[in-house]
Image: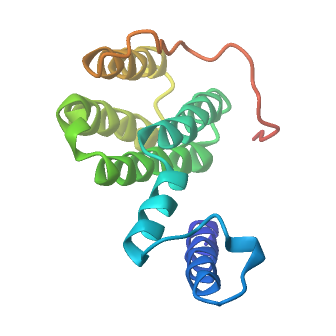
């Protein structure tokens, strides 16, 4: 439900921006100038590429960790599916990164999904370590080895089971 609401708000905002730019006097939308295609390109620039998606995925990675630690399986499932969706949307914007993400999408995420579905705390540390390694491997393949993911040490979110 929240995902749909967020999507609708985003579409509404996008529509408002485009409509506002067509008005003769639009003091709040002066930054969005040029042809329709130039305006769309500028909006795409503001939505950005893979980096913004990675910020969300990084947040959800941490939440997934703590959800499983708390055995909050519903929240863990939610975070995992948000990671999957975030990844799909990011790859839609940057399909050239699909090769690096292949292992993460086809092996790592299904392995984690299986663990969450089984509510398996016994294998959690190993499966989560595999996920972390897959993140770092993908970063290295994308020539960004300086982005090193580690297991979360401190809980940042107030969400608890």
Q: How is the image coloured?
A: rainbow
The image position of residue 24, as x and y in percent, is 66, 90
Figure quadrant of the C terminus: top right
Return the residue nearer the eye: 153 or 137.
137
Q: Where 105 falls versus 84 (above or below)?
A: above
What is the x, y in percent for residue 127?
A: 39, 21
Left/right placement of residue 86 relative to residue 155 reads: left
Q: Residue at x 47, y 20 (%)?
A: 122
Instruction: Report whether 93 appears left or right of 5.
Output: left
Residue 109 figure quarter: top left
Residue drawn at the location 27% of the way across and 38% of the way down:
105
Q: Position of residue 156 (x, y in %)?
A: 77, 28
* Residue shown at 76% from the left, 72% from the top: 28
Q: Is residue 2 above or below residue 86?
A: below
Q: Quadrant of residue 159?
A: top right
Left or right position of 150 against 36: right
Q: Residue at x 51, y 25 (%)?
A: 121
Question: Looking at this rendering, what residue extends furthest in the right direction?
Answer: 158
């Amino acid at each position: 439900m929240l995902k749909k609401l967020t999507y609708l708000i985003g579409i509404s905002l996008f529509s408002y921006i485009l409509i506002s730019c067509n008005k003769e006097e639009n003091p709040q939308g002066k930054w969005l100038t040029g042809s329709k295609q130039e305006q769309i390109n500028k909006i795409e620039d503001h939505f950005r590429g893979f980096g913004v998606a990675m910020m969300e995925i990084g947040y959800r990675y941490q939440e997934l960790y703590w959800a499983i630690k708390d055995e909050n399986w519903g929240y863990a499932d939610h975070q995992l599916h948000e990671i999957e969706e975030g990844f799909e949307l990011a790859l839609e914007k940057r399909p050239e990164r699909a090769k690096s993400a292949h292992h993460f999408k086809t092996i790592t995420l299904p392995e984690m999904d299986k663990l969450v579905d089984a509510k398996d705390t016994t294998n959690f540390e190993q499966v989560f370590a595999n996920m972390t390694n897959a993140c770092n491997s993908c970063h290295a393949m994308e020539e960004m080895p300086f982005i090193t993911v580690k297991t979360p040490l401190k809980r940042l979110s107030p969400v608890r089971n």
